[in-house]
Image: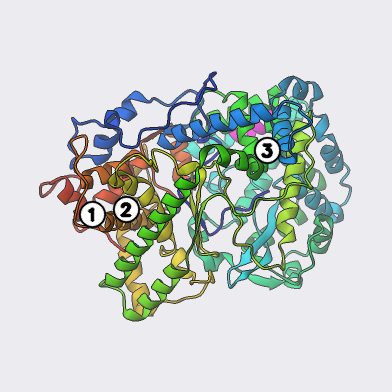
Amino acid sequence: MQRPTLLVCVLLLVTLASQAQSQSNSSTLPKPMVSFDVNAMDKSVAPCDDFYQFACGNWLKNNPIPADQASWGRFNELHERNQLVLRGILEKQSADNPKRSSNDQKIGDYYASCMDETAINAKGTAPLQLTLDRIAGLSDKGQLPALVGYLHNNGVSALFEFSSEPDSKDSMMEIAGTDQGGLGLPDRDYYLKTDEKSVGLRKAYVAHITKMFELMGESPEKAAADANTVLSLETELAKASMDRIERRDPNKVYHKMTTAQLQELSPGFTWSEYFATIKSPSFSSLDVSVPDFVKGMNQLVTAASLDDIKTYLRWHAVHNAARLLPAAYVDENFNFYGKTLTGSKELRPRWKRCVQFTNGDIGEALGQAYVAEEFPPSSKAATLKMVNELEAALKADITELSWMTPETKKQALDKLAHITNKIGYPDKWRDYSTLTIVRGDALGNALRASDFEFKRQLKKIGKPVDRSEWGMTPPTVNAYYSARQNNINFPAGILQPPFYDPNIDAAVNFGAIGAVIGHELTHGFDDEGSQFDAQGNLRNWWTEKDRQQFDQLEGCFLNEYDSFVAVDDLHLKGKLTLGENTADNGGVRIAYMALLDVMGATPEKPADGYTPDQRFFVGWAQIWCESYRPEFARMLATVDEHSPGKYRVNGVVGNMPEFEKAYGCKPGAPMIRKPACRVW
Ligand SMILES: [Zn+2]
């Protein structure tokens, strides 16, 4: 069970659906991708009219979304390539060879077990039986905390989340934390909105739960009644949950209290029993992120009947296991979470799902082999050099800002100087020696991996934060900034073309990976990150006047992105995407400044008919060429803090006079915003 990525700003949201891959029976590795792709461009469109279309138009035309996809873009293409590398590693290690290292045995046997669909079908729900029996055996609400503890150990997201986290106000220490959770739909809004689409999705969700219960042997009537029970209980949890926009305020999700105070909030749920079952280290205080949620959860377990609670838990147990149960469960799971929610037409081939699960469950064991094959020390050194160049540019930018007072600048520069850079992979790999992976036990392996991860998180409580740890696995095509650790993290998986290409001009690399680095750095200074100091503590280091200025300047982005249409008549939420939009705008500007510094007095020569300035902007645009199915676009507008690719490009370049100049845009050109928005 993973807590929401609170206070960790990723470059893009990667859901199960968007990780979906196209059908391919060939395991030969395609050539590296092209960084500046003239064939992707649509030169019939003027760059000052629609820059995204100019840079990506032909790519969009020639790359329809594959049937098993919810979206398709350049990220997916690189992810696809990385998947093939991982498949090669896993197929080699899945041979039952006694000479394999301990890690190779784990990744190989995990993958082989997952691939063995015949064995999985033959076992039916037997691997889940112990869990189902324990739920059926619940005879008194007093036993509920112990049962929920058991389920959390097995990765079942029941009622709430519990884990360790760096203390927002003492960021060197790990504390215990509990947060809202326990829903089967992607967001609280799905339960509460009353528009036609939302009502329809809830009906489809109930139909899906009904089918899952029928597969487990319930009569159609009982299954339908039980599904409605699940929806009604989850709706109560949704009502008690804080919405995503509010959650962006770090003060609103930090409430340190004693365990006695937590107990007072929820007299119907004995926390000490829960803590004893999960064997957490002892502690006397914890972060209760959303106290109202705990009250709502208490209200629910007090008011609901024992049978209804058991129904709710049974649903979450089977939902958690569905991906590794027999084909009928996998297909029904895809039918709702793939088809209905994201618009995908076909289930991904099994090997791609198994690569994804192996990476998700024991990713640092797999990542070591990936790094050895795909990430030479030269790439690490080159990226680190660029990071230093970007940091120098941000330092110059902060120093020259006209709106910020010297007092706050001093603090901002101190924060910048304290950002640590993590590139490629961890210095110290995770030790999986206590995790048992058994050949032929696909679901058991996944449950033990959940248990391993849950316990690993709990062990941190009361200890100093290990800042060398990674929150993403090495093959991941993504990046993140951690506000409570004040560090930026770039997995090896993204340090490849089209993001970073050792054989292309600096202009393109700075437009692509350079702007991504700038994006992550800027997160330390967006609406959320700026509330944390150099040490990662939630502490105000701004003068009141500067903070007012900052809020006002960010308000410009808020209005700009509010005006963009996500799908049909659904607009982006400017407030939800504010941090990411600030990071995109700041990141591209800083990368551009860094490029000018690096080129110095001798600019690079034009190539493919474009000047270095022009190539820089195409470099940025072409990492975001992507299309979405309408269902998925609708889901992302609700849950994703990132804007779609089109607006990550056009929303940024329109704010930059440097773009206007590079392409010689005429006054009044559609791309150019007046007045332009700018914070950093
Ligand atoms: Zn971001």
User: Quick one: which residue is furthest to the left in this view?
Assistant: 666
Residue type, numbered disc 3: Asn
Within the magenta stretch, is there residue 209? Answer: yes
**Label 1 or label 2, whichever comes before in sequence order:** 2
Q: Main secondary structure of the magenta part?
A: helix
Callout 3 secondary element: helix
Give the residue at x 29% y 43%.
Answer: 505
Q: Which residue corresponds to mark 3?
A: 228
Looking at the rendered image, the disc whose residue lies closer to the viewer, 1 or 2, is: 2
Within the magenta stretch, is there residue 637? Answer: no
Write down the region rendered in magenta. Answer: 204-212
Q: Is mark 1 within 8 Å of ligand 1?
A: no
Give the residue at x 53% y 69%.
Answer: 536
Res. 673 in view: no
Give the residue at x 79% y 21%.
Answer: 122
Q: Which label belongs to residue 656?
A: 1
Residue type, numbered disc 2: Val
Q: Is residue 202 left or right of residue 285?
A: left
Which one is in front, 160 or 190? 160
Q: Which label belongs to residue 588?
A: 2
Q: Is residue 30 left or right of residue 87?
A: left
Q: Is residue 124 left or right of residue 166?
A: right
Are the residues at dot 1 and dot 2 in contact (C-beta closer than 8 Å)?
A: yes
Looking at the rendered image, the disc whose residue lies closer to the viewer, 3 or 2, is: 2
Q: What x and y, as percent, mark residue 95? A: 72, 25
Q: Quadrant of the C terminus?
A: bottom left
Residue type, numbered disc 1: Met
